[in-house]
Amino acid sequence: MNSISTSHELASDPSRTAHLAAFQQLQQNGQMHDAAAHLARALGLRAYVVLPFRGSVPVARVLVLQSILAGNALIHRFLDDRLFQVHVLLVEFWQPGTPLPEHDLVFNAIGDADVREQALVQGALILQASAAPVFNPPAAVRSTSRARNADRLQPLHGVRTARTIPVNRSELASDALPVTLERHLFRFPLLVRTPGFHMGQNCQLVESNDQLPGVLDQLPGDELLLLEYLNARSADGWWRKFRVLFLDGQLYPVHLAIASHWKVHYFSAEMANHAEHRAEEALFLQDMDSVLGASAIAALQRIQRVLALDYGGIDFSLDADGRVLLFEANANMAVMRPASDSIWDYRRPAVERIYQAFQQMLLERIQPSPASRADLPIGKTSIQACNQSRTLSA
């Protein structure tokens, strides 16, 4: 639908015009969840998107809950389109009474509890109409906000979390700042960030009162997070950040990023420039238990049990005593396949193990299949065959 026809239809349909006006007003007020629902009605958008399927008969029909806004886990890359028929339901566009498509299981891909709480509430309402197994139930994801995680994971043995407090921008004004810091027992240096952003975006280190006004000028939004700064610099002067995935109750190593600065992310860690860092990561991927140690592995298992996610993960470092320094733990942890350059060949087996384990997790919990699909080769053999085919054709 082009913009001219859209404008004409809106102008000739009072109900659509009203929805568009509601969208604009709610958007200005920052009520993005409700705004998206009105935009869908104004433009006549459907709640469902059916992804292409290249197989003959699907071994599983997957209903994926997703927000039209940001904050979704990138699980589509795991769903091989020769095995899985996928319907994506955009929860902001759903209207009560809309029937769900036929499905064998549900995966809630709404992963950011800090900014998508309303979408998670909506997702829980939608799932009342489904009897299929649900992965990452919305209620479990809602408990993974940064502030909630800081509170509930701090008591765990072997874990250190950053004290995390939601604040209004006005509480960080120069005249209010001393009271705010004292009330929450904060000291410099500290972190200030806008909720809902990842990969270090809109997260700043503040080392003194004088730096704070300039930092606030760079951050969007009135609702901010004040975080304790956990110094994860190792004795050799480098910063390390491990990523471990929690998948169906098991731990899987994803990557180790080693950087010369505190804001560590794999894409900015310059791992390609340091063969010794790649060798260290390879050892972590091959023998995670030995690299982290029994105490840290036990701490990660405690975190996994508290999070209670089918799919989730944690970014962390280790302090001098071997404790887990938790940076982030939620359902939004991405697992990216390495680039084609041969220097990353050491990473491929670990990533492929995760892909196969994800698919197997889904297939093991499928409801009894219809007779028309009863003879399909569901299980590890069919998964491995598809993965091998994909690898050969890549």
Image (cartoon, rainbow, N blue to C red):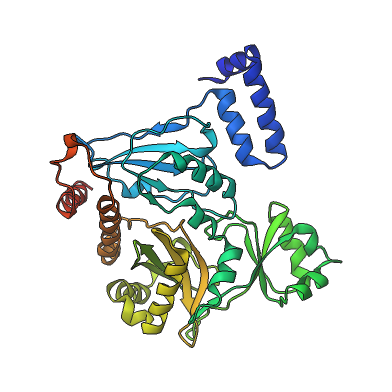
Left or right of 198, for residue 211: right
Q: Examine the image and state in which quarter residue 82 appears.
A: top left
| Residue plotted at (49% across, 51% down) | 138
| Residue plotted at (54% across, 37% down) | 92
| Residue plotted at (13% across, 41% down) | 375
Image coordinates of residue 220 in percent, x first then y, are 69, 52
95 or 154: nearer the eye?
95
Asked whether residue 269 is in view, the answer is: no
As drawn, the residue found furthest toward the right would be 175
89 or 174: nearer the eye?
89
Q: Examine the image and state in which quarter residue 136 appears.
A: bottom left
Image coordinates of residue 317 in percent, x first then y, are 47, 76
**Looking at the image, residue 198 lies above or below residue 1:** below
Left or right of 26, for residue 393: left
Image coordinates of residue 216 in percent, x first then y, are 73, 59
Left or right of 293, for residue 146: right
Image coordinates of residue 335 in percent, x first then y, are 37, 57
171 or 128: nearer the eye?
128
As drawn, the residue found furthest toward the top would be 12
Left or right of 329, for residue 102: left
**Looking at the image, residue 233 lies above or below residue 149:** below
Asked whether residue 121 is in view, the answer is: yes
